[in-house]
Amino acid sequence: MAERFPSPFDAEVPTGAEGWEDLYTYSLPFSKDRRDYEDSTFWFQDSIHWADPLTPWEATWYEYAIASLSQYNTRHYLIPPALGIDYRVLNGYAYLSPVPVLDGAEIEARVPQFMERAGFYFMNWDDLYDKWLVKMKALIAEMETLSFQPLPDKEEMEVITEGHGMGSGLTIQEEYRKLLNLSLKLWQHHFEFLNLGYAAYLDFFGFCKEAFPNIPDLAIAKMVAGVEVDLFRPDEELKALARIVVDNGLEAQLAGGMSALEGTPFMDHWNSVKEPWFNFSAGTGWYHTDKIWIEHPEIPLEFIADYVGRIKASEDIARPTDEIRKERDRIVGEYTELLGSEEDKEAFQGKLGLARVVFPYVENHNFYVEHWAHSVIFRKMKELGDVFLKAGFFADRNDVFYLKRDEVNEALWDMYSAWAVGTAARGPVYWSSEIGRRRGIIEALREWSPPPALGEPPEVVTEPFTIMLWGITSDSIAMWLGAGDDDNADLHGFAASPGVAEGPARVISSADEIGELQEGEILVAPITAPSWAPVFGKIGAAVTDIGGMMSHAAIVCREYGLPAVTGTAFATRNIKTGTRLRVDGSSGTVTVLD
């Protein structure tokens, strides 16, 4: 078994991607002046969120998200054993490194501060969460008001008669800066609760491991299953629309698309729920190329058509919530009986109760931030891209994503200044060649296969996100170091959702391939997206490369009663479509049967 992962400084640059570092802010790439630190540190590739190379502007999400996550660990709640998560880009791909607190005295000193700060949130969770929802909806509404319009040939007369004392050039620059500020504010809101949600679950997890030394991780996870969360609402609305189709005999109109459904009860319901529930990304919500349901109705229509077929075949398309809750309560009852004292039982119930209270947020934030808010921001950025397109700066509205966020400010100034002076801007000449170069670099980077990790493995991982979301533990690191070379070997990962299923594999690398899934196939993907839930009723099981017990893939699979193994590291590399598999979601094993 290897003792360490490759050095980030030994990675070869793909042909055609030379100079890729210039696409990002200067602090993002690994750099020789930080080599001693970066080469001796453990980094893992975050393919849960950023499986593809980041365009320059999309790297904004990466920086905003990880800095905000870290801020709450280090400056708000003072998580005792963990500081933040350091982050870098290598050949366009995102790599993360949890930063532990190494001084035992410092950990001890942080405990009472964490208890005071986190305790306030835990004691007032429902009230604070209700206020969070109000804040989030107000923030998104403010984003919706942003408007990017081409600079006019002349200002309206009202600018003169009302004494505005400023013009359109200032407005468009202010709107963009406001978009950036709101985006950072969005990510500050995102982690207000999420770190604590994982911390509460980890506290319950730790209690269970101490009280019941042989308890499986999956049994602990199942104790908080069977919850109602907003992330499942888009799928529930698809089911409601499918029932409307069947009840009203609208199968022919459904096949004809949205125009054929106008004036029907289907459209009445669609229009009543599309905002916000169909601001749902077909991908992870991190890339401007991800298709949004409300903008690409053919995607939800395809899911609805599948549900219609299943309803007409007398299948039950409802999530098996009652069965999941029954199993949950059975497990809780059995483990409660194993506790010897009333004090232990009271502590067990208290920690379980808190974990269940905070758990819905662990999923709900995903809809409000990565899906709804990101959908709005991407739409606004594309509107801005249209302004540049009309001004001759770009050949395509999406070219705006090939500028770094501060370069957009520079391009806006160039456009404004030339408009104000009455001369030609440099942008149309400068960006036409530069964006072509950058597009070529990003395409070249797609051909690179990023290693799952880099650098020196840690003795122990303590950062709660790293463990629960990404599934990075000492065991998984050892698995990465010692496995993956034998394409026919069994794969091991997290026992993420119980059950056993056999069937042919369908390897999916992007949301565009979801329609290829057939009844009974095993979905094999780097990670699943929440918007893939409508196919869970027809596949046999799910297998992912990355993700822990609290990754979205694991949670969604448990709530839909689908066997799943997450965090296998090598599934999409070692398994080919058509290969017959046995997926044991109770043991975390994927067996190649062919």
Image (spheres, grey):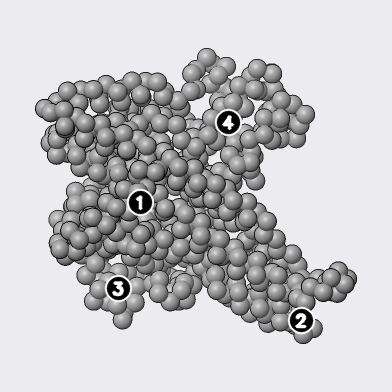
Q: Is residue 159 left or right of residue 5?
A: right
Which image quarter holds the N terminus? bottom left
Q: Which residue matches tag 1?
A: 195
Select label 2 or label 3 by which is in front: 2
The location of residue 26, given as percent across then percent down, is: 43, 76
**What amino acid is at disc 3?**
Phe
> Of the residues under marks 4 and 3, which one precedes in the sequence?
3
Q: Residue at x 73, y 82 (%)?
A: 418
Select label 4 or label 3 by which is in front: 4
- Circle 1: element type: helix
- Circle 4: element type: helix
Which image quarter holds the C terminus? top left
The residues bearing labels 4 and 3 have C-alpha atoms spaced at a distance of 49 Å
The location of residue 572, given as percent across then percent down, is: 36, 46
The residues bearing labels 1 and 4 have C-alpha atoms spaced at a distance of 29 Å
Q: Evaluate if marks 3 and 1 touch, with contact meaning CB atoms under 8 Å apart.
A: no
Residue ranking furthest to the top: 314
How would you rate the neighbour count of disc 1 (Cα within 10 Å): few for under 14, some for 14-19, many for 20 or more? many
Select label 1 or label 4 by which is in front: 1
> Of the residues under marks 2 and 1, which one precedes in the sequence?
1
Task: Please determine whether, in this image, residue 438 is positioned above or below residue 94.
Answer: below
Q: Which residue matches tag 3?
A: 9
Mark on residue 420? 2
Q: Which residue matches tag 4?
A: 237
